[in-house]
């Protein structure tokens, strides 16, 4: 895909947390269920906490949950927090000078794809995706259900 591993892990973790609205979910639980290294995931979740998408509570019984004060965050907000929005302006093959005026060989086909992904990530809130996953029976848990 077009996202870094950090971004993929961030998206997966936030969706996992969305399956448990209002509940604090421990780092170890998230990491184990998503099969992601806990120290690496911790750094990603701290970024999302600093951006106020997640709340982080330290200590026994602590963990992460969606910030109820966040204004209906979307998956695009997660991408923006981790990757930055520049990802949607980058060349599909990594050229620095790619643009509408100086397109790379795939520019005209890649740009609509990139724009469609941006649109898709902004159409629903994280909580809406969590509700949809619950209704469809999807758990997105890769290892075991807690």
Image (cartoon, grey):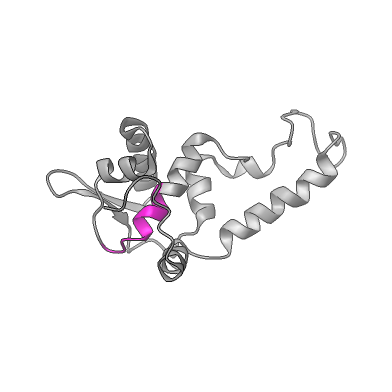
As drawn, the residue found furthest toward the bottom would be 135
Residue at 34% over, 63% down: 69
As drawn, the residue found furthest toward the left would be 60
Residue at 87% over, 39% down: 101
Q: Indicate left or right for 115 with 43 as reference.
A: right
State which quadrant residue 102 falls in: top right
Q: Main secondary structure of the magenta part?
A: helix
Residue 141, percent from left and from top: 39, 51
State which quadrant residue 19 falls in: bottom left
Does the stretch in magenta take in 49? Answer: no
Residue 109, percent from left and from top: 82, 46
Magenta stretch: give its range: 13-22
Residue at 43% over, 53% down: 140
Residue nearest the observer in this picture, 87 or 117: 117
**Number of numbered callouts drawn:** 0
Q: Examine the rendered structure and indicate whether residue 4 appears above or below residue 30.
A: above
**Quadrant of the rendering where the N terminus is positioned:** top right
State which quadrant residue 110 falls in: top right
Q: Examine the rendered structure and indicate whether residue 25 appears above or below residue 106.
A: below
Q: Indicate left or right for 34 with 89 as reference.
A: left
Residue 124, percent from left and from top: 53, 65
Residue 40, percent from left and from top: 37, 32
Residue nearest the observer in this picture, 21 or 101: 21
Residue at 48% over, 49% down: 78
């Amino acid at each position: 895909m077009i996202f870094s591993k950090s971004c993929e892990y961030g998206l997966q973790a936030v969706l996992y947390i969305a399956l448990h609205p209002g509940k604090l979910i421990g780092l170890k639980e998230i990491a184990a269920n998503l099969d992601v290294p806990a120290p690496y995931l911790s750094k990603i979740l701290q970024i999302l906490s600093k951006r106020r998408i997640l709340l982080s509570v330290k200590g026994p019984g602590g963990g992460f949950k969606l910030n109820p004060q966040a204004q209906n965050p979307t998956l695009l907000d997660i991408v923006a927090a981790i990757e930055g929005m520049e990802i949607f302006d980058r060349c599909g093959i990594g050229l620095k000078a790619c643009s509408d005026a100086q397109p790379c060989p795939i520019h005209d086909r890649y740009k609509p794809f990139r724009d469609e992904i941006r649109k898709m990530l902004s159409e629903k809130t994280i909580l809406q995706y969590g509700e949809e996953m619950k209704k469809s029976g999807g758990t997105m848990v890769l290892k075991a259900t807690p």
